[in-house]
Amino acid sequence: MILLGTYNNPRAVQGAADYFKTQGIPVSLRSNDGINVEVWVSETYRTQADILWQDFVNNPHHSKYSDASWQSGHTNSALIYGGSDLNLRQRFSALHWFLKLIFVLCLIVFGSFYLFDANAIFTSLQFKPDAPLSWVTPVLLHFGALHLVFNLSWWLHLGHQIVQRTGARYLFILFIVSSFVSNWAQFLMVDSRFGGLSGVVYALLGYAWIYSVKHSAQEPIVGKPIIGFMLLWMIFGFTELFFISMANWAHLFGLLSGMLIAFVQPKQKHT
């Protein structure tokens, strides 16, 4: 057996393995951390397997891989990993450094509210029209555990999917543009008493939505039920039915900025 390659998306690799089998090439999958999967193949099939592997690496989300999994009778990875079932530490370590940086900064700011002067911390990070750095810093502010967990969960999940699909460049663009746009919108429409990563999260959602529409042959980054739920949540925020103070304009303009970025992004071509 020879090592064909390694890939850091177990589900995608399982689809590739199922597709390889439909082409008469049996492969063996191995993983020690639940993230990075080694693909092994017999020396006999090396030449053909190399061609198929390169095709997979160039377009890992092609529908033929998920179709192969359905044909094989399962869509869940059969890989068995060492350690805990979720491998949370390994999964977090495998994330892009920028995702981890924002995650940690939000946690530090949230924790500092309970250790130091909360008003002073809020004032230092609060939006100020004459301080360009403060056009971004409000995204680090969260005022409750549920608010924090909700935003960080979606930040990591959607951000990781976008990095995997398009690279880190668009994650940076989405973060910077949506921070500016959503924070300015909330300030102009209401006031400067707001905070949270929600505007950025909605930008990631909007980007994932339009990107998936433009690349319909690929597996969607986010499913339609989730998109529907998030849109309804945003609409309910404007109605104030839940008596929860939300930065509704930040959500809306964050969503629109993410959609626009995906719309103007050149469509990726795969061979």
Image (spheres, rainbow, N blue to C red):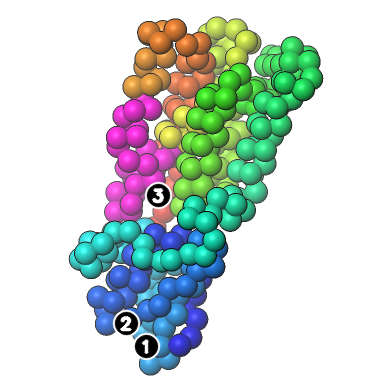
Three-letter code, disc 1: Tyr
Residue 114 position, x and y percent, is 72, 21
Q: Are marks 1 and 2 in contact (CB under 8 Å)?
A: yes
Q: Which mark is residue 105?
A: none
| Residue 22 in magenta stretch | no
The correct choice, above or below, for 85 with respect to 41 in the image is above
Q: Give the CA separation, mark 3 to mark 2.
A: 32 Å
Left or right: 135 as drawn, with respect to 268:
right
State the residue in front, 9 or 258.
9
Three-letter code, disc 3: Lys
Residue topped by disc 1: 45
Three-letter code, disc 2: Ile
Q: Residues within 10 Å of mark 2 (few under 14, many from 20)?
A: some
| SS assignment at label 3 | loop
**Secondary structure predominantly adopted by residues drawn in magenta:** helix
| SS assignment at label 2 | loop
Q: Which residues are magenta?
A: 207-231
The correct choice, above or below, for 248 with respect to 148 in the image is above
Q: Of the residues under marks 3 and 2, which one precedes in the sequence?
A: 2
Q: Give the CA separation, mark 3 to mark 1.
A: 34 Å
Residue at the image point whose x is 55% and y is 7% from the top: 190
State the residue in front, 213 or 120.
120
Residue topped by disc 2: 25
Residue topped by disc 3: 267
